[in-house]
Image (cartoon, rainbow, N blue to C red):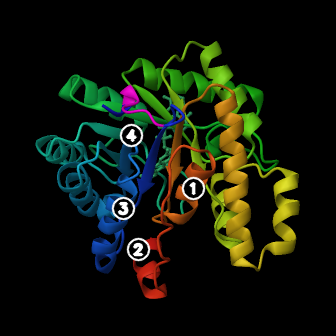
Amino acid sequence: GAENGGNHHNNNVAFSFEFFPPRAEGMAKVLELIERMVAYSPTFCDITWRASSGDVSLDIANRMQNSIGIETMMHLTCAEMPVEEIDRALDTIKSGGVQNVLALRGDPPIGQDKFVQIQDGYSSALDLVKHMRSKYGDYFGITVAGYPEAHPDVIGDDGVATPEDYQKDLAYLKQKVDAGADLIITQLFYDTDIFLKFVDDCRQIGITCPIVPGILTITNYRSFRKMTGLCKTKIPADILAALEPIKDNNEAVKAYGIHLGTEMCKKIMAHGIRTLHLYTMNRDESALAILKNLGVIEVSKIPAPLKQQEQKAIQEE
Ligand code: FAD
């Protein structure tokens, strides 16, 4: 399973690539992209989930595992999912040999700020992990989400969680692990010290499973501000200062994103962490450039950029 770390590379660093389901017309392109990135030997690849595009995730998970031939993880959320539907999804991937699931609660529907449990559904990732272990035993390797800055639900207007809320969030993460999760992947972050402290804090309360940093490379200023706004991610002042003068120059922003991502990963690796999870946003360039800078992969040929209409079809959710 994905939790074993799988094969190791030049640097003894294991890495994984995350993709999301494209619109219908982008399907072939995304599969092509995944196949191209799998050639660099990630330990696993994962596909995100939304109830509204669940069948696309099921389809991609099956193709990743069986046609492309990479250890596959599918995300699954409680949002808008009666238990019957959860089981249908799990049975489907199980029959296709997919053995890894990222068990999540999911976000409230857009426009609502509180998660509402549906009838016959679950209200937390913890319930989903418990359900999977009781119904499917040890079949699935289970991953859960961890939040270095605490979950946005408890981050206040000042941009930080209180120490009490942060500790509660950690204790809850431990419950998810104790209920059967094998691996933690973190929410994106840009303050590497916060991530490293989070790992120490997890170890302090007895969380022993691997904690994989989730790395989202900055490729565009506006999407970066939007994403960090939604996730309430702290942006260190030096990063804002570096971006401010180049924010309208997409090429410069992308180059800075690769530089920053490389430096963040170097610092993380210097602390003995040998696993990296790359949120690709269905783009290969930045993720591959970072791994190349780190000496983790050899890139013989930088792939040609996608044409604009191809980009639209696979990179817009
Ligand atoms: P939970 O672990 O259930 O926690 C949610 C909040 O509730 C936390 O603050 C927690 O402390 C609190 N809480 C819940 N139960 C308890 C309890 N019993 N006691 C105390 N506190 C409790 N979203 C998608 O829709 N699709 C995806 O594919 C997706 N992939 C993601 C991948 C990663 C790596 C990450 C980090 C997030 C992803 N998300 C995805 C977003 C995620 O769904 C949201 O962050 C969501 O708001 C919380 O999900 P969770 O699984 O962390 O929730």
Q: CA distance from mark 3 to mark 1?
A: 38 Å
Residue occupying the point 30% across, 31% down: 1
Which amino acid does the dot numbered 4 rest on?
Thr
Residue occupying the point 77% across, 41% down: 160
Q: Earlier in the sequence, mark 1 or mark 4?
A: 4
Looking at the magenta stretch, what is its main secondary structure? loop
Disc ID at residue 43: 4
Q: Earlier in the sequence, mark 2 or mark 4?
A: 4
Q: Is residue 60 visible?
A: yes
Q: Earlier in the sequence, mark 3 or mark 2?
A: 3
Mark 2 in CB contact with mark 1 (< 8 angstroms): no
Q: Which residues are magenta?
A: 3-9
Q: Tell me where residue 198 sits by quadrant.
A: top right
Location of mark 1 (residue): 113
Location of mark 3 (residue): 36
Neighbour tally class for label 3: few under 14, some 14-19, many 20 plus, Cα within 10 Å: some
In this rendering, which labeled residue sits more in front, label 1 or label 4? 4
Instruction: Relative to 162, say whether 114 is above or below.
Output: below
Position of 192 compared to 236: left or right?
left
In this rendering, which labeled residue sits more in front, label 2 or label 1? 2
Which amino acid does the dot numbered 1 rest on?
Asp
Q: CA distance from mark 3 to mark 4?
A: 14 Å
